[in-house]
Image (spheres, rainbow, N blue to C red):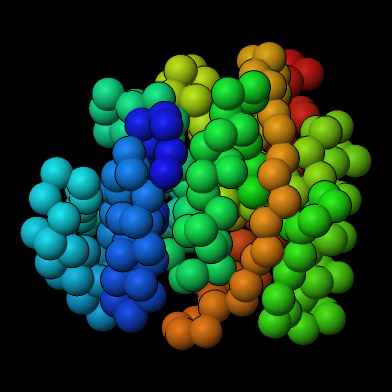
Amino acid sequence: MTDRATLVIVPTFNERENLPVLVNALMQHQNVAVMVVDDASPDGTGDVADALARGYPGRIQVVHRTDRPGLGRSYIDGIRRAIAEPVEVIGQMDADLSHDPAQLPRLIAATADADVVIGSRYIPGGAIANWPRRRRMLSRFANTYIRVVTRLDARDCTSGYRCWRREALASLPLDRFRSDGYSFLVEMLYVAAGLGWRTAEVPITFVERRVGQSKLSAAVLVESMLTPWRLVAMRRR
C-alpha cells in the first residue's frame, strides 16, 4: 500500500507483451495510477493500453503520440499532462519489466525526504540480473563518465526508475530540454540539481528484458556521450 497519490508515466514502443504484465502488477498498489505514453507502436501496444484502461477505469490514462518519436519527447508529453493531475508523486518506469513494480512503494516512501528518488543499481543493495559482462561495464563506465563531467552526486544517473515530488518535476523547464534518448534522463537530473532539488537513491534489482528488443542504439550512445558536456557548457554561459 502507498500513502501518497502517485501517477506513473510509462513510455512504450512495441511492448504489447510486456505492458499487461507491468500494468496489472502496478494496479496491485493502492493510490497508484498509470499513464501509458505510446509512440505509435506498430505492434499495437496502443490498442493493448486502451484495453487495459477499460479494465481499470479511472486508474489508467493512455496518450497516443503521433509527433516526433523518441523517449525524451514521450516523457515531455507525459510530464506536461501528469503535473496537472491531483497527485503528490509522479513516477517514471520502463515498460520492458526491467523495473520491478513491487519495489515502487519504497521509492514513493522516500519522496517524504527527497524531491527526486532514483531506483539505483549502483548503491549497496542494488543489483543487475541477466546482463552480459560487456553491458555491465558499459553502464558503469557511462555513469562514472557522467558523474565526473557533471559533478552529479547520484551513483545511477541513467536509471529510468524514478519518483518525483510533483512540484519538483513541474519546475523543470521542459521547453529548453534538447536530449531525446536516454540522455534525457541525465538532463532531468542535472537541471533538477541546478534548481536545488534534493536527490535520494533507493536500491533496486534491475532485470534485463525477456521479451522484445532493446532500444539502445549507436545514435543513443553518441548522444549520451555528448550530452554531459553540452549541459556543463550551457550552465557556464
Residue 27 point in image, percent of width and height? 31, 55
Location of the C terminus (image quadrant): top right
**Which residue is at the front of the view, 230 or 115?**
115
Where's residue 101, x and y in %? 48, 58
Q: How many marks?
A: 0
Q: Nearer the viewer, residue 5 or 179?
A: 5
Q: For residue 161, say whether it is visible.
A: yes
Q: Position of residue 229 (x, y in %)?
A: 78, 39
Quadrant location, the N terminus: top left
- The residue drawn where x is 77% and y is 29% is 232
Q: Is residue 151 above or below residue 185?
A: above
31 left or right of 136?
left
Residue under the point 80% across and 56% down? 125
Q: Does residue 193 lie above or below 52 as drawn? A: above
Q: Is residue 7 left or right of residue 220?
A: left
Residue at image position (76%, 65%) is: 127
* Place of residue 188 in the rendered image (x, y in percent of width and height, measured from the top left): 59, 35
Near-viewer residue (130 or 234) = 130
The image quadrant that residue 53 belongs to is: bottom left
Q: Residue at x 64, y 49 (%)?
A: 119
Residue 229 visible at all? no
